[in-house]
Amino acid sequence: MLRVMLLRHAKAEPAIPGASDRARLLAPRGRQQATELGQFMARHRLTPARALVSPAARTRETWECVAIALPEAPAAEYDERLYNAPASGLIAMIRDTDPMAVRSLLLVGHNPGLHQAAIELIATGDLDARQRLHEKLPPGGLVVIEFKLSEWSALHPLAGRLERFVTPGEIEAATD
């Protein structure tokens, strides 16, 4: 069984005309969301064996906040290909993963690519969660997909089962 987790960066500061999009940081609320998500992932044993992270400031910050809470979090691998990657590029990155070393992979990136990749990969799982995911993947949203495959290279559209889809709002509501 292989598992991929797709994490959209948490809430970022608004874009400033003329400023670099890559330099946008998380908003204070985004840092809180990412920290709470890391705690959620730790409680639910969702620690990846490998973490590929977009080099944008907001994705790096998201991973840093998540990783602090995870037992034995892997070192982030900052990969330029993740910055605003289309779904096809993300799926190609997943397929290139070494299955002997990595059974659980986390990608921290951006929409619309992450959202589209999730939709393209998922065939089954909780119907309500799949419908919510089809509507949107909000900032700080985490999609966990499981595949009954032994090799990442065998990954194909509609091969996965949605194991869970969680948003910052749901985590916040559960802790109130």
Image: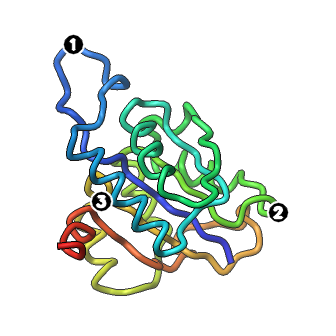
- Label of residue 100 in the image: 2
Q: Amino acid at mark 1?
A: Gly
The residue at 46%/58% (across/down) is 6
Contact check, label 3 and label 1, Cβ < 8 Å: no
Give how far across and how far down residue 97 sits, in percent: 72, 54
Where 56 sits versus 75, above or below? above
**In the image shown, does 152 or 42 lie closer to the viewer?**
42
Q: Which residue is mark 3?
A: 137
Residue 27 picture quarter? top left
Crowd tier of the residue under label 2, counting other residues whose Cα lies within 10 Å: few below 14, some 14–19, many 20 or above: few
Position of the C terminus by quadrant: bottom left
Q: Earlier in the sequence, mark 2 or mark 1?
A: 1
Q: CA distance from mark 3 to mark 2?
A: 30 Å
Secondary structure at numbered mark 2: loop
Q: Amino acid at mark 2?
A: Met
Q: Amino acid at mark 3?
A: Leu
Q: Which residue is mark 1?
A: 18
